[in-house]
Amino acid sequence: MSTPSLLQEELELKHCEQEALRLAKELEQAREAPKRLAREKLDRDNTMPPLRRVGEISRLKRHEEDLTTRAATRNLLKTQTRSACLLLSLLVAVAALVAWALRLMNG
């Protein structure tokens, strides 16, 4: 009767050893995970995107620059229009003062 229990104990021992090896591998993989993730991120950052994506990025960049340029143009136009209105108002005021001064001189 000692033989079957011995075989069973040997099987349990083998099973425990296999489980210990499996756990050791998992632990090693868990220790390597941050390094691996950092390497993968670095690779992704250093890898050029596909050419289709490069074209899309450059198109979006040009579009944003055009919007910026349009906005700057619009702002410049507003400023120039306001300046022209102020200049016209100033000229009208000067003409009114000159007309008033001439009227005073002529009596």
Image (cartoon, rainbow, N blue to C red):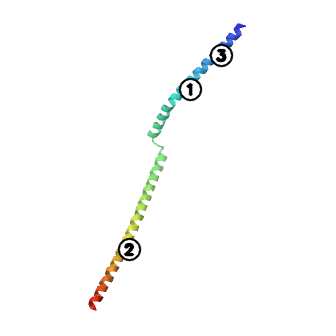
At label 3, the amino acid type is: Glu
Depth check: 42 or 52 in front?
A: 42
Residue density around tag 2, few if under 14, some if 14–19, many if 20 or more, within 10 Å: few
Q: Quadrant of the rendered structure where residue 71 is?
A: bottom left
In the image, residue 85 lies at what x, y percent? Answer: 38, 74
The residue singled out by tag 3 in the image is 12
Q: Which class describes the residues within 10 Å of circle 3: few (<14), some (14-19), or many (20+)? A: few
CA separation in Å, label 3 and label 2 = 97 Å
Is 19 located above or below residue 52 in the figure?
above
Q: Position of residue 104 (x, y in %)?
A: 29, 88
Quick one: which residue is furthest to the left in this view? 105
Q: Amino acid at mark 2?
A: Cys
Q: Quadrant of the N terminus?
A: top right
Q: What residue is at 27 percent from the left and 91 percent from the top?
A: 106
Q: Identify the element where label 3 is drawn.
A: helix
Contact? badges 3 and 2 (CB < 8 Å): no
Q: Residue furthest bottom?
A: 107
Q: Which residue is mark 2?
A: 85
Q: Is residue 11 left or right of residue 77?
A: right
Percent position of residue 16, x then y: 62, 18
Q: Quadrant of residue 46?
A: top left
Q: Nearer the viewer, residue 75 or 52?
A: 75
Using the image, determine if residue 63 lies above or below residue 8: below
Going by the picture, which residue comes out furthest to the top? 2
The label on residue 26 is 1
Query: Residue 91 bears which disc, if any?
Result: none
Could you say whether the residue bearing mark 2 is in a helix, strand or loop? helix
| Mark 3 or mark 2, earlier in chain | 3
The C terminus sits in image quarter = bottom left
Residue extending furthest toward the right: 1
